[in-house]
């Protein structure tokens, strides 16, 4: 499948999504939101993919939402005669845009993101849905929505408080100030900071390769448990773990890992089976 705002490749079990509008600072135009949903649907259906890397091109990771691209939506809203119907439609619009980043969180594969330069507005929503974040020294993060008179609405305020202290999130969200890379590392938003994009991508791809070498079933289960535990009590999460383990524990991967260890070699794991797509999402 071809995309207008990003490139997708799958090589050595690593699916790589790269934002590809550097001349426009990778602003998030209307096509982007559907591209993300479609790209992750393609990744999910590709059995060889075991980990996802999201990166970008040019000086900045993304300058955030392209407000000009939403002129048609504003015009449609103004043309309606019923304010209640306009607001109901707006709610659906926001839910659809939220899905474009929720697919990252719901993807059964770990998602790593590499950030260079500015990560602004919708970019923070995007990285908040990823499993691990890495950046360059010149990177900065900004909840830009407050600076343009709106509340961030596609995931930042819901996910970021699980990543950094609440008081820090509130300061960023209320003021719209920039969090520079050193501060992002201090508070744990990013795992590591690199001097330039070349070393950043080298590190992220190496980390992705390590993850891709592990049992894909065990990695999937680990992400499932971490996400579930974040949103539930410890007791509920422990109970879910017993259910998961009763079905997944005695896998071929377990025996292959043990055999490889005894034979002093790297294990070779089968790919996960792709979803059957019994129910398809239509644009």
Image: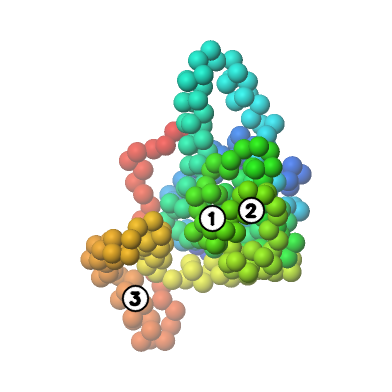
Gap in angstroms between the C-alphas marked 1 and 3: 38 Å
Residue 256 bears which disc, if any? 3
Q: For the residue labelled by badge 2, is the local secondary structure a helix, a strand or a loop?
A: helix
Residue that carries the numbered disc 1 in the rendered image? 160
Task: Using residue 226 as the reference point, say whether residue 134 is left or right of it.
Answer: right
Colour pattern of the rendering: rainbow
Q: How many C-alpha atoms fall within 10 Å of the one at disc 2: few (<14), some, or many (≥20)?
A: some
Residue 64 in view, yes or no: no
Gap in angstroms between the C-alphas marked 2 and 1: 10 Å
Residue at 59% over, 15% down: 79
Residue at 73% over, 56% down: 117
Residue that carries the numbered disc 2 in the rendered image? 172
Q: For the residue labelled by badge 1, is the local secondary structure a helix, a strand or a loop?
A: helix
Nearest the camera: 228 or 59?
228
* Disc with the residue nearer the chain's start (2 vs 1): 1
Residue at 63% over, 69% down: 186
* Disc with the residue nearer the chain's start (2 vs 3): 2
Nearest the camera: 171 or 178?
171
Task: Using residue 267 as the reference point, say whether residue 36 is left or right of it.
Answer: right
Up/down of 50 relative to 69, above or below: below
Residue 62 is situated, as x and y percent measured from the top left of the image, at 68, 48
Q: For the residue labelled by badge 3, is the local secondary structure a helix, a strand or a loop?
A: helix
Residue at 55% over, 15% down: 80
Nearest the camera: 222 or 156?
156
């Amino acid at each position: 499948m071809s995309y207008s705002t990003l490139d997708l490749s799958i090589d050595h079990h690593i699916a790589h999504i790269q934002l590809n509008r550097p001349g426009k600072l990778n602003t998030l135009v209307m096509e982007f939101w559907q591209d993300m949903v479609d790209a992750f649907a393609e990744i999910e259906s590709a059995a060889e993919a075991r980990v996802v890397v999201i990166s970008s091109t040019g000086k900045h990771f993304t300058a955030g939402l392209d407000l000009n691209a939403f002129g048609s939506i504003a015009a449609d809203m103004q043309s309606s005669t019923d304010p209640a119907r306009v607001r109901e439609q707006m709610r659906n619009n926001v839910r659809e845009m939220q899905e474009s980043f929720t697919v990252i969180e719901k993807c059964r594969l770990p998602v790593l993101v590499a950030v260079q330069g500015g990560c602004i507005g919708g970019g923070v929503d995007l990285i908040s849905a990823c499993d691990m974040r890495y950046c360059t020294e010149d990177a900065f993060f900004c909840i830009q929505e407050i600076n343009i008179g709106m509340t961030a609405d596609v995931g930042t305020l819901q996910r970021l408080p699980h990543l950094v202290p609440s008081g820090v999130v509130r300061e960023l969200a209320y003021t719209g100030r920039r969090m520079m890379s050193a501060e992002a590392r201090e508070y744990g938003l990013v795992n590591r900071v690199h001097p330039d994009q070349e070393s950043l991508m080298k590190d992220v791809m190496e980390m992705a390769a390590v993850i891709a070498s592990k049992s894909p079933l065990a990695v999937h289960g680990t992400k499932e448990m971490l996400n579930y535990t974040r949103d539930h009590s410890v007791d509920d999460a422990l109970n879910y773990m017993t259910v998961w383990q009763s079905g997944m524990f005695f896998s071929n991967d377990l025996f292959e890992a043990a055999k490889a260890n005894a034979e002093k070699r790297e294990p070779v794991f089968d790919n996960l089976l792709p979803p059957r797509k019994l129910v398809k999402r239509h644009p």
